[in-house]
Image: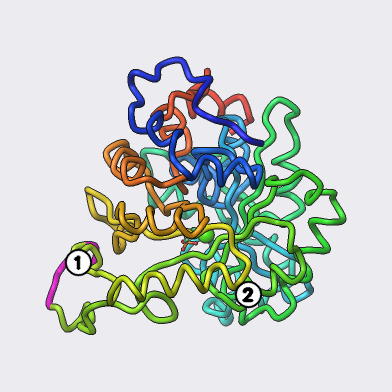
Amino acid sequence: MFKTVKHVCCLALLPLAALAEAGPGSELARAQGIAYPAVIAHRGASYDAPESTAPAYRLARELGADYLELDLQRSSDGVLVAVHDDNLLRTSDVAERFPERQDQPVSAFTLAELKSLDVGSWFNKAYPERARASFKGLKIQTLDEVMDIAAANPQRQPGLYIETKVPNLFPGIEADLNKALQARGWLERPGRVVLQSFDRNSLALLHQHMPQVPKVLLLWIGKGSIEPASQQTFAESGEADKAAFYARQQPRDKAEFVRWLDYAKAAGAIGTGPSAALAGGGAQSYADLVQPWMNQLSHDEGLLVHVYTVDEPVDFRQVLEAGVDGIFSNRSGQLLRYLGRPSARSEAQILRAEGY
Ligand code: G3P
Ligand code: CA
């Protein structure tokens, strides 16, 4: 699993990544069997294909991502599935298929009901320039199916980076996940699986069931996470742009940031997953929790830093220069090119070859 940037062809183009190699994060990553810098395909290659679907995960695998990221939830009949949102409205045709139940949580649907949904057509409408007829009718993936995809090509074997999503809605999901991973032999290779959560209790439960598996505490500024310096809400700020509001947010003080590093370690984490403020703003842009002093403190505490969610070279450069050890990206192909690990085939060529 462990990779460094040593093998890349054009280090002259990568002064930041090369610099980072000498940093403390590379040793921390090596000790955990985690790639460095880690390329984490956020909900798969979800810029080019509908998030958390087979083509998104197959594309990320073929591009060479180190990890396929997924948000874990559970059907009403107990099957683990990859879905990000609390409900199905944004990414499926649930409003047409189950109008009475359209805003119910994922946990209210059986696997057969979830599998009856089309989770591809919304993407074609939202992103016509990236639409493909073959995305129509795509199905929600079970954890087992994502494992199948990750293991399908002997030449390209990404790990899984699994988040327990809204874990309070799914009591026992940490134990279920352990069973599912054990049953498939996924916990045998160190660093093949990384576990993540915003929820400290869920992370501690994951640690109880899988003490040997690396874990990451996700961080942001707001309710249930790092306390902000200012108590002013977005509504009170009068700001038109949410990203601009978030970009001004800072932890209450250094001690508050350190408190969350301590929480991470207490829950068994080997790293944190902080948010980033992006140069172009947008819906993925939050508080900048990867400022150099923060990354330095994290490394001093023996913690890796995997930042979410970064898609553009200008931001890759910014966060790598600040000292992060891995990046969640919807555009893992673009990130791999930036790091000097390009795929021989373009995203479009791979999708065509995979039958999409
Ligand atoms: O898991 C890292 C990142 O994915 C956290 O944000 O909302 O995309 O799950 P979200
Ligand atoms: Ca996630």
Residue 202's tag is 2
Task: Give me the residue at 47% from left, 55% from top.
Answer: 122
Q: Which amino acid, by three-letter code, is at mark 2?
A: Ser
Identify residue for label 1: 248
Res 282 quadrant in image:
bottom left
Label 2: how many residues lie within 10 Å, few (<14), some (14-19) or many (20+)?
A: many
The prevailing secondary structure element of the residues shown in magenta is loop
Q: Under tag 1, what secondary structure?
A: loop
Kindly give the residue lying farthest to the front in the view shown. 300
Q: Which amino acid, by three-letter code, is at mark 1?
A: Arg
Q: Position of residue 257 (x, y in %)?
A: 37, 70
Vertical side of 297 occupied by 336: above or below: above
Q: Position of residue 232 (x, y in %)?
A: 20, 83
Looking at marks 1 and 2 on the same chain, the residue that comes earlier in the sequence is marked by 2
Task: Give me the residue at 41% from left, 39% from top.
Answer: 130
Res 314 quadrant in image:
top left
Residue 128 falls within the magenta-colored stretch: no
In the rendered image, which quarter contains the N terminus? top right
Task: Give me the residue at 33% from left, 27% from top.
Answer: 15
Q: Is residue 79 left or right of residue 203?
A: right
User: Which stretch appears magenta?
Assistant: 238-243
The answer as to whether callout 1 falls within 8 Å of ligand 1 is: no
Q: Position of residue 209 (x, y in %)?
A: 77, 68
User: Distance from label 1 to label 2 (Cα)?
Assistant: 29 Å
Q: Position of residue 67 (x, y in %)?
A: 60, 43
Vertical side of 78 occupied by 55: above or below: above
